[in-house]
Amino acid sequence: MLEQRDHRGKRFTIGHEDATDEIAIERCQRAEALERQAQHELCELERAKAVAGPAGKHPEVEVLKR
């Protein structure tokens, strides 16, 4: 493995591309999982807002804002 710097001064390594690809794949999979979780939570929030109704109508129920 060989460490280099690009034109911006950022470090990067050459070699062991398989390990880098595995790390990149894991990061992409984690990002996709987090995106699905965020979408699921947004759907739940929308359902909760629909059930709670407008905030002024039921002051005892606090509606979360994004």
Image (cartoon, rainbow, N blue to C red):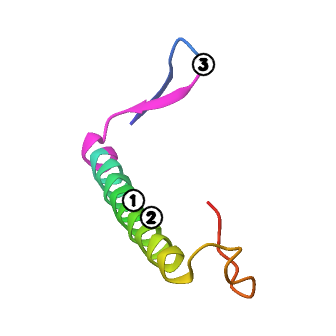
Which label belongs to residue 35?
1
Looking at the image, how many numbered discs can be counted on the residues? 3
* Badge 1 vs badge 3, beta-carbon distance below 8 Å: no
Look at discs 1 and 3 and give the one toward the viewer: 1
7 up-or-down from 64: above or below: above
**Residue 52: where, in percent of width, then height?**
56, 82
Please state the horizontal and vertical placement of residue 10, each as a whole percent of the image: 57, 25
- Residue 12 magenta: yes
Residue type highlighted by circle 3: Gly
What residue type is disc 2 on? Answer: Ala
Q: Residues within 10 Å of mark 2 (few under 14, many from 20)?
A: few
Camera-side residue of 1 and 64: 64
Image quadrant containing the C terminus: bottom right
Q: Which mark is residue 38?
A: 2
Taking the spot 49% from the left edge, 83% from the top edge, the residue there is 51
Q: Secondary structure at mark 1?
A: helix
Instruction: Identify the residue shown where x is 30% and y is 42%.
Output: 16
- CA gap, disc 3 to disc 2? 35 Å
Q: Are marks 1 and 2 in contact (CB under 8 Å)?
A: yes
Residue bearing the label numbered 3: 9
In magenta, the rendered stretch is: 9-20
Asked if residue 65 lies left or right of residue 43, the reply is right
- Mark 1 or mark 3, earlier in chain: 3
Closer to the chain start, of discs 3 and 2, is 3
Q: Nearer the viewer, mark 3 or mark 2?
A: 2
Say few, some or many: other residues with alpha carbon within 10 Å of mark 1 (under 14 / 14 to 19 / 20 or more): few
Residue 63 colored in magenta in the image: no
